[in-house]
Image: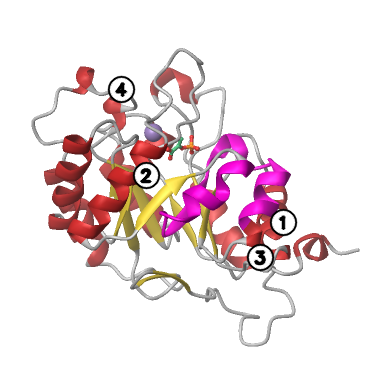
Amino acid sequence: MDEWEDYRLVARHGKPGFEGNLDARPVRVGGVTFGGPDPVVIAGPCAVESREQTLAIARAVKDAGADCLRGGAYKPRTSPYDFQGLAEEGLRILAEAREETGLPVVTEVMDPRLVPLVASVADMLQIGSRSMQNFPLLMEVGKTRKPVLLKRGMCANLEEWLCAAEYVALGGNLDVVLCERGVRSSWAAEYARNTLDLNVLIPTRQRTILPVIADPSHSTGDAQLVPWAARAAVAAGAQGLIIEVIGEETSVDGVLCDGFQSVRPSVLRRIVEEVRGSAVPTA
Ligand code: PEP
Ligand code: MN
């Protein structure tokens, strides 16, 4: 069996109109198109921490030109003692932020039992890096008709990532966007949280018709590096970005989750302007 047969529904191989090019099958989230000619920018807080924080950041990212709002109501935290998210209250806040800004909401679901609840609010369901091979979860989101943002497992190879997408597709949901979010490496921890795998972007597009975006926040773990990683990712073939943001005046230490890697809205605006000015390279 050829490798692509393991992920035959999402494979480029054998799809009329897609062979011999790098075009994606577009994925639409609200009025936003992933895999089209322009890079898409998802931005927002790591976690929904409060109504005030989320609404303020939602307005700021909208103003900076972002296309979608991100924010976790259910957070996968390494320590069980860390802030775990506001859960249902967080979902209500996200719904309010969408109402006010018009931005489609991208939010993570970790528990297969919560897929219907999270899908009742989310415009796009995020599967986090730690859940990439939670097969019951993948099958559950495959049953929904909500677009899925499938982050790459931090130690997953490309075939494992594409097979994870296949689990979603097999449920009848082909609206999957892949996200490279940095991989573990022996060098990373010295100066960055992970290693942004720029090399994977074009091989991913060569093998699948799914759009692929990049996460410069979790891959670098450092707000100073985010604009550089964002530019590099788009130049290397990413069809969009997902970026963590904190308030312009917020103290990094006052943030419950990932403040050190979150950029200010003014920086986000610059990134958006830069990537908007450069259509996704086609070769
Ligand atoms: C996130 O985007 O909120 C997140 C937890 O990222 P990852 O799953 O890539 O670690
Ligand atoms: Mn985060």
Classify residue 25 as left or right of residue 274: right
Earlier sequence position, callout 3 versus callout 2: 2
* Residue 256: assigned label: 4
Count of picture labels: 4
> Comparing marks 1 and 3, which lies closer to the viewer?
1
Q: Which residue corresponds to mark 3?
A: 207
- Element on which disc 2 rests: helix
- Element on which disc 4 rests: loop
Confirm if mark 1 falls within 8 A of ligand 1. Answer: no
**Which kind of residue does numbered mark 3 sit on?**
Arg
Instruction: Name the one closer to the observer, 77 or 50.
Output: 50
Q: With respect to residue 103, does 80 lie above or below?
A: above
| Residue that appears at 50% across and 38% down | 182
Q: Which residue corresponds to mark 2?
A: 91
- Element on which disc 1 rests: helix
> Comparing marks 4 and 2, which lies closer to the viewer?
2
**Is label 3 in contact with label 4 (beta carbons under 8 Å)?**
no
Q: Residues within 10 Å of mark 3 (few under 14, many from 20)?
A: many
Earlier sequence position, callout 1 versus callout 3: 1
| Residue that appears at 60% across and 71% down | 209
**Is label 4 in contact with label 2 (beta carbons under 8 Å)?**
no
Outermost residue toward the top in this view: 81
> Comparing marks 1 and 2, which lies closer to the viewer?
2
Earlier sequence position, callout 4 versus callout 2: 2
Q: Residues within 10 Å of mark 4 (few under 14, many from 20)?
A: some
* Residue 167: assigned label: 1
